[in-house]
Amino acid sequence: MSIQIRKAQAKDIKAVRDLVHELAVYENEPDALKADLNHYHEQFKAGLFNCMVAELNGEIVGMTIYYLRFSTWRGKMMHLEDFYVQDKHRRKGIGQKLFEAFIEDSKSQECKMVIWQVLEWNDLAVGFYDKYNAIYDKEWWNCKLFFDGE
Amino acid sequence: MSIQIRKAQAKDIKAVRDLVHELAVYENEPDALKADLNHYHEQFKAGLFNCMVAELNGEIVGMTIYYLRFSTWRGKMMHLEDFYVQDKHRRKGIGQKLFEAFIEDSKSQECKMVIWQVLEWNDLAVGFYDKYNAIYDKEWWNCKLFFDGE
């Protein structure tokens, strides 16, 4: 079994977007993915997000998508937007390798902290993050306005 | 009474950071502001955040801090990190002007949506956002790891 974690290239973006859709289904939001592949390519090229992929025997089975943000309290921070390993490939340490590669890249970019979100009912994910002594803020709501309809 | 909303310049950053501290006190987190003025200047210059200020008769009394993010579901979006008007200058429409300038700038940068957070107990803020038909997601927790101690 060969696991490789590496930065994504443009040729990987279709596979990455397919994993985003799988994750949306897992989160009970099968129709949530509205951004098309062309938009992904444009924004990846523009540097709006970083992406790492996990390859298992040469096949992409997991990914992280992350980017810089500015915390008014702490300063430069990295946000983990998506983090996914296919269900059938869990319990092989792939998620750990992906998450730790994200942490390392954030440190190398001189971030003060990393930040992400988890669904309150996702016990499996919370258990994973507990191992890293993650700190949870549970009293914030996410708010949004769409410009292009729901 | 003259209200002006404009993009911040480097000379405004000290006043903006002072407002961040005022907001932290309002949010019952008086010791939360760790990023120093030098870091603010560095990251503003690096383009890590956008900032608008509200001037009332020439004095800065409010601000927004915001930046681009990538939604894996929607694509390019703008995140409103901080939004504050001094208590004594509320009910003059300053918040509305600031928020709408943020929306306009986000549209002009071709964002698909805007996103921000609100504390669940902040009824005043929720009432404000309700007027814009904001959509709330209440089942996410914020997770973080600090690299430089708590």
Image (cartoon, coloured by chain):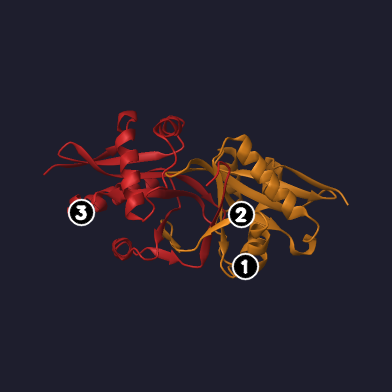
Chain colours: A orange, B red
Asked where in the image residue A25 lies, by quadrant, the reply is bottom right
Q: Which mark is residue B90?
A: 3
Residue kind at label 2, given as amino acid type: Asp
Q: Disc 3 versus disc 1: distance between alpha carbons?
A: 40 Å
Q: Classify mark 1: residues with Cα within 10 Å, few (<14), some (14-19) or many (20+).
A: few
Is residue A125 shown above or below B6?
A: below
- Camera-nearest label, 2 or 3: 3
Q: Residue at x 77, y 61 (%)?
A: A90
Q: Which residue is mark 2?
A: A82
Under circle 1, the secondary element is loop
Q: Chain of mark 1?
A: A
Is residue B29 shown above or below B12?
A: below
Q: Classify mark 3: residues with Cα within 10 Å, few (<14), some (14-19) or many (20+).
A: few
Q: Which residue is mark 1?
A: A122
Instruction: Name the side, left or right, on which A117 lies relative to A15.
Output: left
Q: Chain of mark 3?
A: B
Q: Residue at x 66, y 50 (%)?
A: A64
Residue kind at label 1, given as amino acid type: Asn
Q: Position of residue B31 (x, y in %)?
A: 40, 47
Asked where in the image residue B50 lies, by quadrant, the reply is top left
Q: Classify mark 2: residues with Cα within 10 Å, few (<14), some (14-19) or many (20+).
A: some
Discs 3, 1: same chain: no
Q: Residue at x 85, y 50 (%)?
A: A57
Q: Residue at x 49, y 63 (%)?
A: A138
Discs 2, 1: same chain: yes
